[in-house]
Amino acid sequence: MIANAAWDRAIGMLPDRMAAHLGVSAAAVGLALLIAVPVVLVMAGRPRLRAAVLTAAGVVQTVPALALLALFYPLLLALSALTERLAGFGVPALGFLPSMLALTLYALLPLLRGGADGLASVPPATLDAADGIGMTRGQRLLHVELPMAAPIIIGGLRTAAVWTIGAATLATTVGQKSLGDLIFAGLQLEDWALVVTGCLAAAALAIITDMALWRVETGIAARKWRKAGLGGALLAAMVAAVLALWWNARPPETAERPVVVGAKSFGEQYILAELIASRLREQGLAVTVRSGLGSAVAFRALTAGDIDLYVDYSGTLWSNALGRTDVAPRASMIATLRTELPRRHKVQVAAVLGFENAYALAMQRTDAERLGIASLADLARQSDRLRLATDTEFQSREEWAALQRAYGLRFARLTAYTPTLMVRALIGGEADVMTAFSSDGRIAADDLTLLTDPAGALPSYDAMLLIGPTRPDLARRLQALEGRIAVEAMRQANWQVDRATDKRTPEQAARWLAGRIAEK
Amino acid sequence: MAVTLEYERINISRGGRPVLVDIDLVLPAGGLVALTGASGAGKTTLLRITNRLLAPDSGRLLIDGADAANEPGPQLRRRIGYAAQGVGLFPHWTVGDNIAAVPWLNGMERQGRDRLVLEMLDLVELPQSFASRMPAALSGGQASRVGLARALAARPGLLLLDEPFAALDPETRNELADRIEALHKAQGLTTLLVTHDLADALTRATRILVLDGGRLVADATPAALVADPHPAVQALIASPLDQARRLVRLTE
Ligand SMILES: Nc1ncnc2c1ncn2[C@@H]1O[C@H](COP(=O)(O)OP(=O)(O)OP(=O)(O)O)[C@@H](O)[C@H]1O
Ligand SMILES: [Mg+2]
């Protein structure tokens, strides 16, 4: 069963996230309304334009919301660079703005369709009568068309609101606080209390909004103004309740903008972010953690100043930040990054933490000893009799091609699994070798051996603490972490949050890890 | 005050095809004029030109000697009673609000409108309690009467009725026609009444206009019309005449 502490933690996260979630959803629907109203009015009585606009909005709808959100980030970065040059100030590219804009696009289709269908539903004889008795265009719209179309228009608004509240959970990936924070963190950490709480809260917001608007819709349709007003009141009450919750739970005022520590969306990143945050807090700084960032978003968020620091890995930076496709030895990779990152991106390397999170091949220790395999070279001699289990992306990655080139690996069978099933396949004897990450907690827990890479075919992934251009002073405060986290310690900390029983929160694992660092 | 209408060589095309061709016509004040012709002949179009819902491509319309094009459309239309084809009551307004629509547009006070609504309901012979009903709760004949009341509420000098009897049973339609005839006389109106049915036109109007393919093919008193040799007019008269003869034979 899920421990009470886990529920308490999940519920503690709610007020803040719920207020942010509602805020970004309401802003998106509001902006979409501002756009949709004039567009609908222009479309009325122009069937060709109407078809073109609705088709365009329909195309936007087919783009997955996650991709739409991710697309807005580079777009805003480019825009920010432009405004910086032209007007001397940038626009924020992470968080509220991209989320709101992407969600606005998403909300547009049901609003446009509701508006267009609503106006088209007014019978021609009624319009003729309105013109015939001497109403002006404006009077006809205000007193005849809009009231008659209102139920269908509000139907569109209902759909837009429910979709937006649902899709807003994805805003977490571009650094906007939302109920998605709970869901993403919970899925990564297999903390079901977080997932369930996040989902229920999002569903509750959507259902209450839908019910309230349904009352408004049916109230207007039946001309029962009390019922319509009740719907509006319900909506207002929900907003007020969420705001009150948020106000009570808000952190105390600080004059300075807090330091923002970024984290990608997996356990190790959550732990390291908490570790760094607590170090900075001990030095008297105000700190917040922005976790769940998409892998592609994190580095750009750092250079753009949306986050101040985070941990990334040398192999990733090598290809993504420096655009290199070659493989270099571990030490020269780090040296190059230390000189090139400040020069090209104004990003400093405060510390190389001392462990790697690299792709590797792993075997059960007993098997490896029995077969006499310690390195990839040993493995190559027997690989045609062995079966390899990989994660879903490994077979399409450059690392796999490099391994085949360097060692001539040919396996008897090659099967792709989800990470959890992959481990089960190895332990259950359905596979002999599997792909692994070198800092994975399961390596110690499941008694696995990582095979060495004598040819240096696999790129190294050293964890590096990066400091962005906004707070260069942080480098000095954290440089003591250089080389202090051993891979065994990181594995154990990861295992504490990954394991199914006796799970720890990332904060608890970070505290344990801090203790290990102090001992050294 | 009844209104004089003068149409001067009016032409209009819709969708690339001529719908009215060279309409030249003077309707003196006080006439009850029936406008008839086959479906698609241009009757509604001529009515809509009369209250400027449509502007002719060429030609002029003079209302009491003044060019209708010189007055803003909405203002002009508030002085002309109009009952659209298909009635078109506002479903979200009460019967009373529908009837008082034009006075309301003209800024009349609530109390004045309430009094007017009751008077109009009397005029079209509907119970005063109907004022608070919604249009959905009316029969077809009742709706037509409310439409007529709405057209008359601003005390216009000109009344345009587009097939007010469509979809009514013969008895209801006769009652309504009687009502319109009586109101026309009592209110001192010029009335232009579009009807498909020549029998109505022949028995009630002072003058009958026949449109065929957008041209005015006959313009006469009922008696003169029956003698008109134009094939379009003959075709229109043939069927009601035939019906009447068969009815007479049955009663003999
Ligand atoms: N908006 C329009 N676009 C194109 N053609 C039109 C339009 N409105 C009317 N017409 C055409 O003009 C012609 C006359 O139409 P109108 O409505 O005046 O006929 P009508 O005599 O009132 O017929 P009915 O007895 O069926 O009401 C018809 O052929 C019709 O198709
Ligand atoms: Mg017509």
Image (cartoon, grey):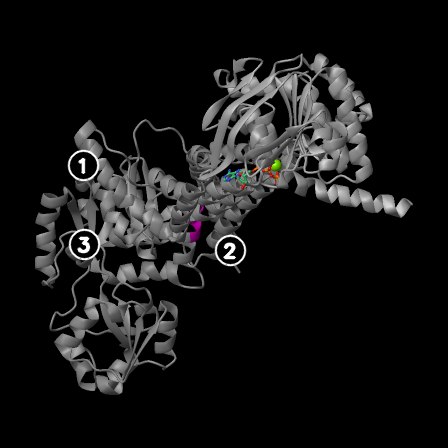
Q: Which residue is labeled 2 in the image?
A: A3
State the residue in front, A352 or B147. B147
Write down the quadrant of residue B156 in the picture: top right
Q: Residues within 10 Å of mark 2 (few under 14, many from 20)?
A: few
Mark 2 and mark 3 in contact (Cβ < 8 Å)? no
Q: Answer yes or no: is residue A37 visible.
A: yes
Residue A353 painted magenta: no
Q: Please tell me whether residue B17 is drawn above or below residue A421 in the rendered image.
A: above
Please say whether residue A508 is visible from this viewpoint.
no
Residue A217 picture location, percent across and down: 61, 38
- In the picture of the structure, the residue carrying the numbered disc 1 is A473
The segment highlighted magenta reads: A179-183
Q: Nearer the viewer, mark 3 or mark 2?
A: 3
Q: Are marks 2 and 1 on the same chain?
A: yes
**Which dot, 2 or 1, sits closer to the camera?**
1
Question: Which amino acid, mark 2?
Answer: Ala
Quadrant of residue A139 in the image? top right
In this rendered view, identify the residue nearer to me: A135 or A478: A135
User: Is label 2's Cβ within 8 Å of ligand 1?
Assistant: no
- Label 3: few (<14), some (14–19) or many (≥20) C-alpha neighbours in 10 Å: few
Q: Residue A254's x, y, as percent?
A: 34, 29
Q: Is residue A132 above or below residue A394?
A: above
Q: Which of the labelled discs sits on residue A320, or is there none?
A: 3
Please state, as top left, top right, bottom left or bottom right, where the C terminus of chain B lies in the image. Answer: top right
Chief secondary structure of the magenta span?
helix
User: Which numbered disc flags the more N-terminal residue, 3 or 2?
Assistant: 2
Disc 2 from disc 1: Cα separation: 40 Å
Q: Chain of mark 2?
A: A
Q: Is mark 1 within 8 Å of ligand 1?
A: no
Question: Which x, y percent locates residue A231?
Answer: 62, 35
